Image (cartoon, rainbow, N blue to C red):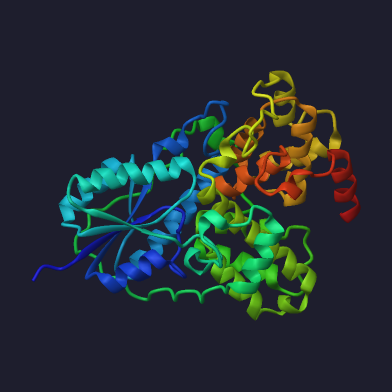
Amino acid sequence: MSKKVVLVWFRNDLRLHDNEVLTEAIAKSDLIIPVYCFDPRYFHKNKFQFNNTGIKRAQFLLESVLDLKEKLLSMGSDLMTFVGKPEDILPILCAKYEVSEVYHHREVASRETQISELVEAALWDNKINLRHFIGHTLFHKEDLPFPIKDIPDKFNIFRKKIERESSVRAPLVAPDKILSPQHLESTSLPSLLDLGYSDEEINQLGSQNFQGGEQNGIDKLQNLLDPSYDNFQNFSLVSPYIAIGSLSPIYVYHEMQNSSLSQNKKRFDRLMTMLLWRDYFRFMLKKYPNVFFKLNGIESEAKNSESINEELVMSWKTANTGESGIDEIIQNLLDTGNITYAERRLISKYFTQELGSNWLAGASFFEEHLLDYAPATTYGFWSHMAAVGTSPKENSCADWQDLAKRLYVSK
C-alpha cells in the first residue's frame, strides 16, 4: 500500500506552533515535505520604483526561514528552499516525490491570491489538489457571527459584534515529530546577493533590532507582556513576527489572557485593538476584493490625485521635508524598518495632506521598508489616512499637526 505524501507550502506561516496546515498535514498523511519558495516577484521594483521587499525585511525573512529549517531538521525533517516561482517549482517536486496533495494557508490580497491560482492550475494539470486553509486571523472565518458579505463596514460595530458573539480558538500545539521521505534533496537558503540585492546595499545593512524566527518572536512577546515593560513600542514590538507568521495571533491573544497584562485594561485593550484591526483589514479584502489597492477605495467618485509631485515625494522619502518631527520618524523607519502606529499615522497623514500625490506611492514606501508589511494591514491603514477606507469614521483622521502635538505630548 502506497503512503500518502503531502507537500506543505509555507508562505507567511513560518512557525510550528498553532499552524493549521502543518497540524492537518500530520494528521492526514504518512509523510510530509515542507517547502518554501523565494518568489522573485517579491524582489522586483514596483511601478513607483520602490522595492517590493526592502533589504531589512529580506534579511528578516531569511532569518525566519532559516530558523524554521533548523527546527525541522532537529525533528528529522527539513525545509526545502528554492528561488523561483512556486507554480514552476511545486509541480516538479510533486512528481519527483509522488505527492498526493499540497496544503497551504490562503491569502487575501490580489497578488497573493493570483499566485495561489497559478499554483492551483499548474498542480491540477497533474491531477494534484491544492488544499486551502485559513489560519492568519485571530477569529476564524468559520466562527464569525456574519457571512463575509455582511461584515459591518464600521470597525467599531465589527469589533463589538465579534467580541460579543465569537470566541478565539485555542492555539494548536506545535508538533514534536514530523515524518518526511528519506533522502530529500539537500537545499540551502539563498543569500541577499542571490535575491538581487547589491553589495552596496548589503554593506549598509548594519546590525538589526529584530532577528527573525519563531523563538525570537515568542521572546519579544514575553517582553511586551512583562508588567515592568515601559518602552514606547507596543504592538509594533511583535507585529513583524505576526506579519511573517512566526507568531500566531491566536497564540498572542492567549498569552495576553494568561499574563498579568489582563489586569492592565489600557494596555490590554490597546493590543487587542491592533489584533482586531488586523482581522478587519483581512476580512474587508475578502468582502471587497482589492479595495485597499484602489486609489479611491470604495468611493464612487474620484477623491485623490493620480499624479505624483516627484520633488515633494523625494523629500519625504529621504527625510528631508524640513519638518523635524516628520523627518526624524522617516529616518527611523529607514534605519530600523519599524516605527509605532502613532508615528505611521503622523507621517502618512503628512503625505496625504501636504504632498498632493498619489497616496499609493506612500503605501508602497511602507511596503518596501516596514518589517511588518502585510498587504491588507498596510494598504488598509493608508486607505483610511487617504480618507477612502472602508470604515467611515476612521476616514476623518485629525490633521497631521494635531497628530504631531498628541504624539510628542504622549512621549
Q: How many marks?
A: 0
User: Compared to 95, does 147 lie above or below?
Assistant: below
Of residue 120 and residue 373, the one placed in the foreground of this image is: 120
Residue 349 appears anywhere in the view: yes
Percent of width and height locating residue 321: 80, 28
For this view, does 383 lie left or right of residue 6?
A: right
Residue 111: name its quadrant: top left
Residue 5: name its quadrant: bottom left
For this view, does 285 lie left or right of residue 122?
A: right
Picture residue at 52% right of the left edge, 57% below the top: 148
Picture residue at 68% right of the left edge, 19% below the top: 310
Of residue 287 and residue 114, the one placed in the foreground of this image is: 287
Which quarter of the figure is the N terminus placed in? bottom left
User: Compared to 187, does 364 lie above or below?
Assistant: above
Which quarter of the figure is the C terminus placed in? bottom right
Percent of width and height locating residue 279: 58, 58
Q: Residue furthest left?
A: 1
Picture residue at 72% right of the left edge, 51% below the top: 341
Picture residue at 20% right of the left edge, 58% below the top: 99
Of residue 118 and residue 343, the one placed in the foreground of this image is: 118
Percent of width and height locating residue 366: 63, 39
Of residue 268 and residue 388, the one placed in the foreground of this image is: 388
Residue 211 appears anywhere in the view: no
Residue 145: name its quadrant: bottom right
Percent of width and height locating residue 293: 57, 37
For this view, does 221 lie left or right of residue 142?
A: right
